[in-house]
Amino acid sequence: MKNADTRDFLEEMEHGEGFVRYQGKDYFVHGCTFKPGEDGKPQFFFMDVYDMTARTFVWKTEKETSEEAMKAFLSEPLIDGKTFWELEPELEWTDGPEPGS
């Protein structure tokens, strides 16, 4: 991963959000977040990857636990049919989209 340690990025995605650039395109990664039920406890955990250029989600998941959501993030195809680990060498962790994106 460019501009960052992969472990730091993954730790941030366990509870936060961030931007990555892949082959010149910017993506917003909504890290592991829970949707509360009526009792305030997690109903499910979700994560998604949003293409800032096409203005569409390229990947989404909802799982019962944060661990399952992170496992899906690491193992399912996210962008161009590639998993996180296949994308990782070319991903750049950025502060946001490039101006004009």
Image (tube, helix red, strand yellow):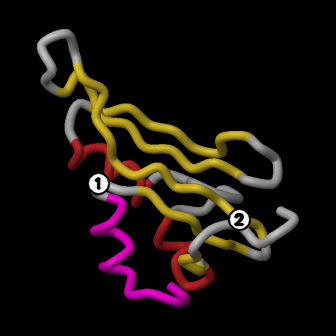
Q: CA distance from mark 1 to mark 2?
A: 20 Å
- Residues tagged 1 and 2 counted as in contact (Cβ below 8 A): no
User: What's the magenta region?
Assistant: 1-13
Q: What amino acid type is highlighted by mark number 2?
A: Asp
Look at the magenta stretch and give its main secondary structure: helix
In the picture as drawn, the residue positioned furthest to the front comes out as 99
Q: Residue at x 19, y 10 (%)?
A: 38
Q: Quadrant of residue 45?
A: top left
Q: How many marks?
A: 2
**Magenta segment: does it hold 8?**
yes
Q: Residue at x 79, y 75 (%)?
A: 24
Task: Name the one closer to the observer, 71 or 40.
Answer: 40
Q: Which residue is mark 1?
A: 15
In the rendered view, does 54 fall on the left or right side of 76? right
Residue 15 percent location from the top left of the image: 29, 54
Q: Residue at x 55, y 88 (%)?
A: 2
Q: Residue at x 54, y 73 (%)?
A: 86
Q: Which residue is mark 2?
A: 26
In the rendered view, does 17 fall on the left or right side of 79? left
Q: What amino acid type is highlighted by mark number 1?
A: His
In the rendered view, does 7 fall on the left or right side of 50? left
Residue 17 percent location from the top left of the image: 44, 57
